[in-house]
Amino acid sequence: MPIDLDEFHSHFFQNIQASAASGGGWSEDAFFDEFCKYLIEAGEFDTADRTPYAPAKGGIRVDGYGGDPITTDGILSLIICDFEQKPEVQSLTATEMEALFKRLTNFLSKALDERFRNSLEEAHPAFGLADLIAARWASVIKVRMFLITNKALSSRVDGKESGEIDGIPVTYSVWDITRLHRYSGAGAEKEEIVVDLEQEFGCALPMLKAHIDDAGYESYLLVMPGAILAKIYDRWHTRLLEQNVRVFLQARGGVNKGIRNTIENDPKMFFAYNNGISATTEQVDMRREQNELLLTRLTNFQIVNGGQTTASIHAASRAKGVDISGVFVQMKLSVVPSTNSQDVVSKISEYANSQNKVSAADFFANHPFHVRMEEFSRRIYAPSPDGSFRQTKWFYERARGQYQDARGLLSEAQRKRFDLEYPKSQLISKTELAKFLNPWNEKPDIVSKGSQKNFAELAEVISTAWEKDPNTFGEAFFRDSIAKAIVFQATEKLVSEQHWYNGGGIRSRVVPYAIAKLVHDTRLKGKYVDLKAIWDAQAISEGLRAALILSSERVHRVIMGENGEVPNPLEWAKQQACWNRVKQLEIVWPSKWFESLLSKEEVEQSQKQNKKDQRMLSGIEAQILVQTAGPGFWKETRAWGRERNLLSPKEDGVISFAADGRVLTEKQAPICVEILRKLHGEGYQGGLGLIS
């Protein structure tokens, strides 16, 4: 149910204040982090790092940046904030907007001045950003300036050309509270991508109808000039890529060398060699001209397969001496109405990318792992830390907006009960889960690279482990994951309380490194943190608190550079070399705490028992599912599989028992469920709602 702008802003503002209070940080930092989560998800940039600089005089300001231009196809993204500490929506005038962009432009110009850089303290985050800009300026091809604000701007500014700096084109983009409200899906409208081929790109493209009139959908085939595709991608960048594809590319890398070689050395053969792209749109505008169907405009255009092709063509268009005028790409375009676009587009993306042999765990929210975590979060109560009868749950949000949607359907009295049962502070998204878990996998450098790359990394691990044994991920895994979330959030607060912490984005690096260092050192000694004790207490012990403070201080020195040898700590922390140096640190851990840790044998025994328990639980659940579906359903399913020779002798034997109405054992029932999942993958439509 859509909520209006005022209510959305009220929720957003309260979240900022609660996040700042629980994490021991400042409201401006919480605002930057929370707002940029949406922009990363929207594809504006892959990561956002906080580097606040706003001197009292000088008309200069910057709040953060969207990654090293070396890793973003030569695009420098700079961010400035305008956070109003009032619960009501305030207005932002065009004059105020221009003044803010002017301050950001001034910082960029100053960053190119060596005297200005030398005037900054080396420990200040802005020095690292200024140094990065100066070092990368020769390779920058475009500057994108973002204004994020919880005020409402009367006019929309998205990618507005704003001249040049030192010959480099600069664009403005404003994300105000109205636009955020629209993008989040909380309102009736949604953030749109409108590709006007005629007005903006000077062409209308011939296309062929590729659907039957009563098929229930529209599909077209066309040839897209590489130069036009590159311009469209330059305009919206990764926002064009359906989110699943974006995360996939995070795991695989952006520019394909084979595609690039064809563009550079044999461009006229590109159409023949390349598989083309698959895309969706919510609406097409077209006209007929001399019996030819011409595409003129696309609304909410999304590339669901061919992201590497698109990124590679765009990169080639920016390279010196490369002519892409002879490059053409075949495109299959499906028209998907907005009413069911989210589910259908994700399905098209999944199936279109199936030839890449990528597990759904890489990016799909409906993978059984996420479904299972969601199910656990809805029924497992957390122990009451104060010993009272009031218990709460941790809400796992496998798809954006689930929490707000669940809450929005309730009456006022029901909302109060919901808020008590699922406190906002106990809401975890799937990307946050990756942030909480990967330090325990000793990958703080990956966590530092941002939510998208970090999630892709964890997805690879989960995918492999799930295929090997899904029972690894039982109730104990869920409780341990929450314990790791508690450790991460507690460490954030501890870091904010330290005398050496001066705000900015450095906490986002210190926290995962501090946890990973502790995990690394204890593992080498055959010791492990008692996660069950953390779950039971819903808090960390005093001993662990002392160890994390010690670890945080030591890793902070390495990340910042003890002798000033690190010009940009935020980028340095993303490197494996930084983690290698932290691993080499000699830390004398508190002996009393160290002795309280679990042994390797205790952990292995517990894991063995947990798998056994989950195996039994999965078997019982499968038995219930088989019985609920009934013999008639399994008889029909068996017939469908046998007609297409899709059942092995073992599978046919098990499903025949179900078709005869026999009671399957705890070992047989899961086989029946897997048969159904397998047949769904082959196109069987029966029982689609039975399993996820």
Image (cartoon, rainbow, N blue to C red):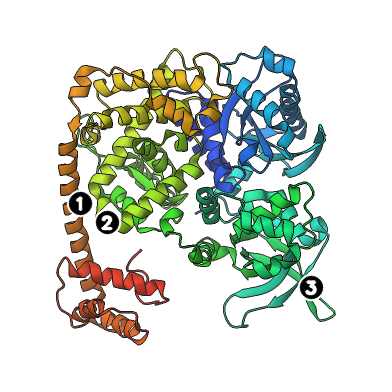
Crowd class of label 1 (few under 14; some 14 to 19; many from 20; radius 10 Å): many
Q: Quadrant of residue 556?
A: top left
x, y (%) of residue 477? 27, 45
Q: Amino acid at mark 2?
A: Asp
For discs 2 and 3, the disc positioned in front in the rendered view: 2
Q: Which mark is residue 611?
A: 1
Separation (CA) of disc 2 from disc 3 = 54 Å
For discs 3 and 1, the disc positioned in front in the rendered view: 1
Which residue is painted at 70% across and 65% down in the image? 270
Q: Earlier in the sequence, mark 1 or mark 2?
A: 2
Q: Is residue 276 above or below residue 258?
A: below
Q: Secondary structure at mark 3?
A: strand
* Tag 2 near tag 3, CB within 8 Å: no
Task: Report whether 339 appears left or right of 402.
Answer: right
Q: Which mark is residue 469?
A: 2
Q: Earlier in the sequence, mark 2 or mark 3?
A: 3
The residue sitting at the front extreme is 265
Q: Amino acid at mark 3?
A: Arg
* Tag 1 near tag 2, CB within 8 Å: yes
Which residue is painted at 79% across and 42% down in the image? 161
x, y (%) of residue 636? 30, 84
The residue sitting at the right extreme is 290
- Give whichever of 453, 338 is nearer the camera: 453
Task: Report whether 272 appears left or right of 569.
Answer: right
Residue, disc 3: 287
Q: Quadrant of residue 135?
A: top right
Which residue is painted at 74% across and 62% down in the image? 267
